[in-house]
Amino acid sequence: MSNEIVKQFTNKLEDYQPIVGKSTIDELKLLASRLARKNVQNVNSTYVGGGVAEILSRMVPLLNQLGVNAKWDVIKGDDRFFDITKKIHNALHGRKETFSSDDFDYFREVNRKNQDILWPAADYYLIHDPQPVLLIERKNDLGGKWVWRCHIDISQPDKKLWGSLDDFVERYDAAIFSAPNFTQNLSITQFMVSPSIDPLSDKNKELPTSTIEAVLDQYGINPQKPLVVQISRFDYLKDPVGVIQAFEMVRKGIDCQLVLAGGTATDDPESDKVLDEVRNRADGNKDIKILLLPPGSDIEINALQRAATVVFQKSIREGFGLTISEALWKAKPVVATAVGGIPLQIHDKLTGLLCHSVDGAAYALKQLLSNREYAEMLGKNGKEHVRQNFLITRHLKEYLLVFTALYNTSDIVYL
Amino acid sequence: MIDWFNANWVLIVAPLSVFVAFCIIGLWARSFVYNRLTKLLSKSGWSGREILVRTTRGPFFFWIILLGAYIAFMISDLSNPTKDLAVKIIASIFIISLIWLLMILSDRLLALYSEEIKTPRPVGKHVANGIRVTLIVIGILILIDFWGWPITPILLLLSALILVALVAFRDAILNVFSGFEITATRLVKEGDFVKLGSGVEGYVIDIGWMNVKIRTTDQNIVVMPNSKLVKETVMNYGYPLKKAGAPFQFFTRLHLKELTGLKAQNLTELIDILKTAPDAVIYYHTYHFLEEHQYLTPEPANDFALWVGDALDDDVLSEKLANIDTFAYSSISALREALLLALEQHLEGHPGLRDKRANRELYFIKSISFVLPTPYVASDLREFVEVIRKISTGSLYYHVFESRLRLQKRSNDFSVWIRDQFGEDDLADRIDALFPYTYTLEALRSAIIEQVEKRIK
């Protein structure tokens, strides 16, 4: 299965050269030459859906192109296992969850059953997120270096759950987090590697004007009127109602339109409720469009972002918030709240505008809609910020550096 | 017999006399013609003159003797068929000797030119064999035609063979002719620094019949077929500049962020951590913005200044910290002391701020540096400037910013090398004077290139 996913990725490393420059590609090759023929196994819980699978589907083939033997496997489990891991995920995020007395035992049992997927020849095991975290129990038998790649914010976890997991996490050689404020107090080395976007993916690649126009036409969006867009699933944490409120404040003085586009989460029963609430709130306002996009609407999302005058991300709580980088990559001015990983992507007044309230969001939107030069400058800076810090080539480089750092403990490593 | 001789001696002696006379004239004419020819060619300065004189001197005399033999036969009393036969034999000998002479001459001239343009031995040998075969074929065809034998089938066969050879060796033939063009027009010469339209650039290290070899700044040898080179846009910078005793090896520096787990919520915690944190932590928070925000100019302030202003809302202290020129310190410990001094001085006047809680925590990150040698090496200022165009911003950063901390002196690697290797103090000072905060890394690259180009133009 992983082979099929990986084969779908046909980009060559050199395809990124016009975007990041030859020297960046050369440096990747130079660094990878020190890790040539090393075996790296990635393990997570799914081949499709979600940011981790999306990144691995690109990262693994690119590592192989660089001469590192990378492979990707997933653990198998039944519905009960994935219900438990969903609860673990939520509890690590700080949400209150109820675990039965044998939930953790079952979680451990399924992890043990999956131990045979581990590649004995691997030099590095990169275990992604909490679902396969207990595979570490094979560390002593298999050797190699073990890294727990935690993609979620575990800074405020359910203490009881974390108390059960941290002993296992401490057995890893290192952990990787996406942002400094996502971490826990651990005795092992913790690296910071932010996630990334792929500039050549459907969601981010350049689009012909005709495609953008076709998408606008498809959803009945006026291409002549300034467009404010928020792309996110319908979830209270994304504050879609707050976005409508801010928009309405601005709309009184500036002619513009708002599009809230996204999907609903199948595992979140609140999703449909939020969507209904948002639709009711927007009902009767011809300048607001609520678009429920089916999974795989990458081109539509890309087109909406490219057509936008301003992009919003008014989350109340956020993970890393890579949609910010997606919008910045399209040189769009972004208004976002300073939560999760957003401040790493938006430096207030340099690469976008940060806000802390509906009023703040409305004020920032007004500034951007009425001062196009300022908006353009922020968008331009934002694009360069993403080019240097949030593209997959940087992500690839940092993984290679983590592998190198595991065998070199000094602060300056001469290779 | 004697009677016959008495009656016909004139018919024998006359042709013999003519022949002997031509031998004598030949000796004189050779001496006269070649003395003149040698003087004439000496003035031309042509390097092949000696070969021409040495090679043709013998055949010249031989051909005069052949002419004597021809006239002797013509005035003899032999029958016409015998005379015809003799003329054909003499003409054939002339043709054979002419072909032989041309073969020797082309061999020697080829050897001379091969020496001049350093042709690889197998190529020179193939070209010499080709010329020999061509001359022999031409000679045979002339002889066949001369003796009246049918030539058309042979010509057809030869044409077919030549066509096949042309198709099979098309590239090689094109390269050889392009090689002549390169040599004749002096498009490039050994030692020239060239930039081709295709992006290849470096010093020409060898020019051959088939290709030109270029050593690039990343120490690769590019073998460019002559036929391709003549179609390229060639920017030729001419001969190399003064070579450095020690070439400049370009390094690059990549960095990885390590989370230390340390965080500050107020100024007391900030000061405590600043006192004990590893150098690599102080380094990260005072330098990383240069690399991560290299598109911005002027650069944003260091993390401590930003945090104090943003999270503690203390603009005065923020400005004090921002005004600390991190670039002016040649060691992290000196920079650390400067930061602590600014904090302590400010708190002396505002003791109440010491424990004021920030609206967000400052997380301390350690920068782990990985230093790698790149393939780029510069041995003179031309190579140096061309490499500067190509290196990553990480490499530029390493040699301009990190060097000060590494070398513990207020200079950068480039200026030190230029000063030490070439004694170019002015240029070194001008590069040193480029104040990095006022440039993005790309603009800094352009400014360095501009300074060096001004000097070497």
Image (tube, coloured by chain):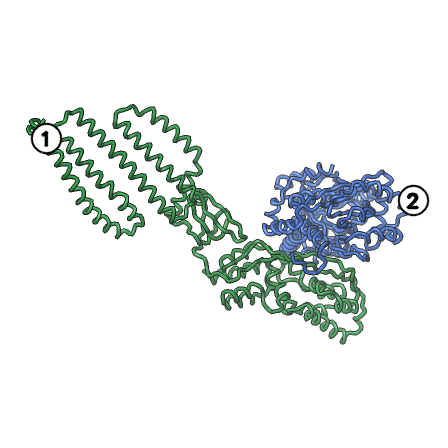
Chain colours: A blue, B green
Amino acid at the residue labelled 2: Asp
From the image, state whether disc 1 or disc 2 is nearer to you. 1
The percent coordinates of residue A255 (x first, y second) are: 68, 49
Name the residue tied to disc 2.
A102
Circle 1 marks a residue in which chain? B
Between residue B214 and residue A291, name the one nearer to us: B214
Q: Nearer the viewer, residue B440 or A252?
A: B440
Q: CA distance from mark 1 to mark 2?
A: 137 Å
Residue A302 appears left or right of B431: right
Seen in the picture, residue A101 relative to B438 is either above or below; the reply is above
Q: Secondary structure at mark 2?
A: loop
* Picture residue at 57% right of the left edge, 53% below the top: B375
Residue A33 visible in the snapshot: yes
Question: What kind of element bears circle 1?
Answer: helix
**Left or right: where does residue A283 sit relative to residue B132?**
right
Q: Is residue A375 visible?
A: no
Instruction: Please state the horizontal and vertical placement of residue B430, each as a whole percent of the image.
Output: 53, 66
Q: What is the x, y in percent for residue A258?
A: 72, 46
Q: Pointers 1 and 2 in contact (CB under 8 A)?
A: no
The residue indicated by pointer 1 is: B11
Q: Which chain letter goes with mark 2?
A: A
- Could you tell me the amino acid type at mark 1? Leu
Count residues near mark 2 (Cα–Cα under 10 Å), then give few for <14, some for 14-19, many for 20+.
Answer: few
